[in-house]
Image: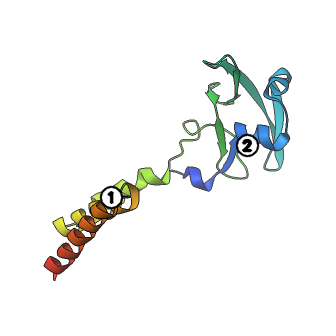
Amino acid sequence: MKKILVEDCERLCIWEFIRDVRICPETLFSYGRYRFPAGNSSQIIEFASSRTNFGGKRIWFVCPFCNKRKGVLYRPDDLSTYGCVSCHDLAYSCQNRHRELKYEVRDKYHIQKEKILKKLRNKCRRSPIKTKLLDTLINLEAKKF
């Protein structure tokens, strides 16, 4: 059975919540809990705090299922309640991608081409290196045919 993806769920992030509500984190923690709309009903979610290394406080949601501190809670569908990734048994889309690639038939050409393109996209900023990678890619294309 395929897991539900995090990207398909409604997301409740503590930092976005603090920004949108425009409330000071210390004031928010003094309330201790907040009522969030969840589908046709509402759900009360508690807050927790932890000390930071620079002397401040960090506010967290408390997952209603496992009672652990979480920065983001998810709601998979309109009928369910908010919970963390592990309690709802959710997966990220990148976790499924490697399974699909594993069963694909890939030859040496495709693997080299992917490595070169990845370097070109991510790390390569200097033109001599970029030129060398592009030449290598052109040579690979020529050898393929």
Position of 74 relative to 65 (above/below): below
First in sequence, mark 1 or 2: give its number: 2
Compared across the picture, whether 126 is left or right of 74 comes to left
Kindly identify which numbered label has been placed on residue 38.
Answer: none
Q: Residue under circle 2? A: 16
The residue sitting at the bottom extreme is 145
Determine the residue positioned at 78% across, 50% down.
39
Identify the element where label 2 is drawn. helix
Q: Quadrant of residue 123?
A: bottom left
Compared across the picture, whether 27 is left or right of 50 comes to right
Determine the residue positioned at 28% across, 68% down.
131
Q: Residue under circle 1? A: 119
Q: Quadrant of residue 13?
A: top right
Q: Position of residue 46 (x, y in %)?
A: 76, 27
Q: Is residue 1 visible?
A: no
CB under 8 Å between callouts 1 and 2? Answer: no
Identify the element where label 1 is drawn. helix
In the foreground, 38 or 20:
20
Position of 26 relative to 80 (above/below): above
